[in-house]
Image: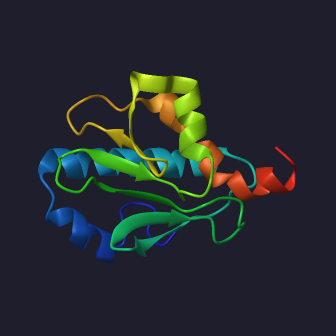
């Protein structure tokens, strides 16, 4: 991790322009991503950087997962947790939780910046994303 106490400068610069509620929600998701990564065997150290102008988390050390991006959903004060749209990750989450959550197609789970973080459900999704490639290799 480039900076375990806070996001890298390039990420902080992006977040500085967001409304407080959006920035705080993104930082809460960031803390959850880091926690899930450290608690999940085989994930290893994450690389935190901007990809497509969005705060992104990559399993570069282990190659165990797909990139997770977290950003403000365009035109709203909602926050989206993006995974690669060619994975089944968002569809699997939708199959499990249905209309309890909002989605942006098959690429993101949408979170309100003003409602509590759905931590248990989001942990499952993040664990699946951060282990996507290693689970695929094992045939899961």
Q: Where residue 137 sits: x, y (%)?
A: 84, 57
Q: Is residue 84 above or below residue 10?
A: above
- Give residue 36's position: percent from left, percent from top: 57, 45
Question: Which residue in the rendered view is the most extreme toward the front?
Answer: 105
Quick one: 44 or 94, which is closer to the camera? 94
* Residue 135 image position (x, y, % from top left): 78, 50
- Give the residue at x 35% y 32%: 117
Which residue sits furthest right? 138
Q: Nearer the viewer, residue 137 or 20?
A: 137
Left/right of residue 50 with respect to residue 129 in the rendered view: left
Residue 113: name its quadrant. Answer: top left
At 68% from the left and 70% from the top, the residue drawn is: 61
User: Whole-percent x and y of residue 93?
Assistant: 55, 35
Q: Is residue 114 above or below residue 62?
A: above
Kindly identify the residue that appears in the image at 25 percent across and 29 percent down.
115
Foreground residue, 107 or 41?
107
Q: Is residue 75 left or right of residue 54?
A: left
Quadrant (top left/top right/bottom left/bottom right) for the C terminus? top right
Position of 52 relative to 70 (above/below): below
Can residue 51 be seen at all in this image of the molecule? yes
């Amino acid at each position: 991790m480039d900076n375990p106490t806070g996001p890298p400068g390039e990420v902080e610069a992006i977040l500085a322009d967001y409304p407080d509620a959006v920035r705080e929600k993104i930082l809460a998701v960031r803390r959850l991503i880091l926690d899930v990564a450290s608690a999940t065997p085989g994930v290893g150290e994450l690389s935190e950087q901007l990809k497509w102008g969005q705060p992104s988390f990559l399993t570069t050390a282990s190659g165990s997962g797909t990139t997770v991006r977290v950003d403000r959903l365009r035109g709203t004060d909602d926050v989206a947790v993006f995974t690669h749209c060619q994975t089944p990750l968002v569809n699997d989450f939708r199959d499990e939780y249905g209309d309890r959550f909002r989605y942006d197609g098959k690429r993101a789970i949408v979170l309100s910046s003003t409602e509590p973080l759905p931590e248990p459900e989001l942990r499952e999704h993040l664990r699946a994303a951060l282990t996507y490639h290693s689970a695929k290799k094992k045939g899961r």
